[in-house]
Image (cartoon, rainbow, N blue to C red):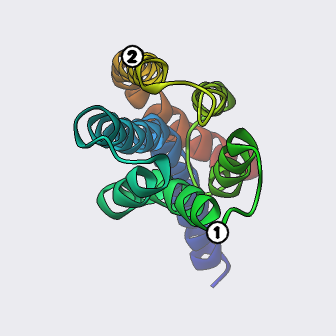
Amino acid sequence: MSIALKLAGCALVVGASSLLGFYYAHRDEFRMGDLLAWRKAFVILNSEISYAIKPLAEAAEFVSSRAAHPPSAVFAALASSLQSRQASDVCDIWKSAVDTAQGKTFITTDDIECIYNYGATLGGADKRLQIEAIEQTINYIDGTIVILREQSEKNKKLYFSLGLLGGLLVVAALF
């Protein structure tokens, strides 16, 4: 019975460390998915401001209905705050909406900073400057995605191997 428990414990340790390696290997892909959702939201916002010529509250509401989860919640909060006129500064509304969604996403502080920077142009800039700010944000996201793809392919095998070998090392140390 003692040997069976040791083998079961070993299997659990190796399995848990392999799952941890699997998680770290796919973390960049999760971040890419979130960034692609933000990119789609900004493209929709760009078209709404450029071609549909909607006010910011209506454009944000439209984006929230079309975008995926992390940005859709931000744009929904922005739209509801703008429609109810809860705050005087649109930048503060944007920042608080991004802050509430930040914990539910895989994007990093650099990505959040870029999204904050876009929010600084909201409300105080004309149509042309808002479109330029959206395009700058989209360009940042595109560049980040290219870097993440290269990095993800390189690091994926490393994290898989480290997870498995780390578990085997713990098992060897315990026996």
Query: Label 2 vs label 1: CA separation?
Result: 32 Å
Amino acid residing under circle 1 = Ser
**What residue sits 39% from the left and 51% below the top?**
59
Q: Residue at x 60, y 25 (%)?
A: 114
Q: Quadrant of residue 89?
A: top right
Question: Pointer 2: residues within 10 angstroms few (<14), some, or many (20+)?
Answer: few
Nearer to us in this view, 81 or 6: 81
- Do residues under tags 2 and 1 come within 8 Å of each other at their CB atoms? no
Left or right, residue 123 beside residue 25: right
The residue that disc 2 covers is 139
Specify whether 95 is left or right of 164.
Answer: right
| Tag nearer the camera, 2 or 1 | 1
On residue 128, the disc is none
Where is residue 94 drawn, in percent x and y? 65, 46
Q: Which residue is mark 1?
A: 84
- Look at label 2 and name its amino acid: Asn
Looking at this view, is 156 or 50 the one in front?
A: 50
Q: Secondary structure at mark 1?
A: helix
Is 108 above or below relative to 71? above
The answer to which of marks 2 and 1 sits earlier in the sequence is 1
Secondary structure of the residue carrying numbered label 2: helix
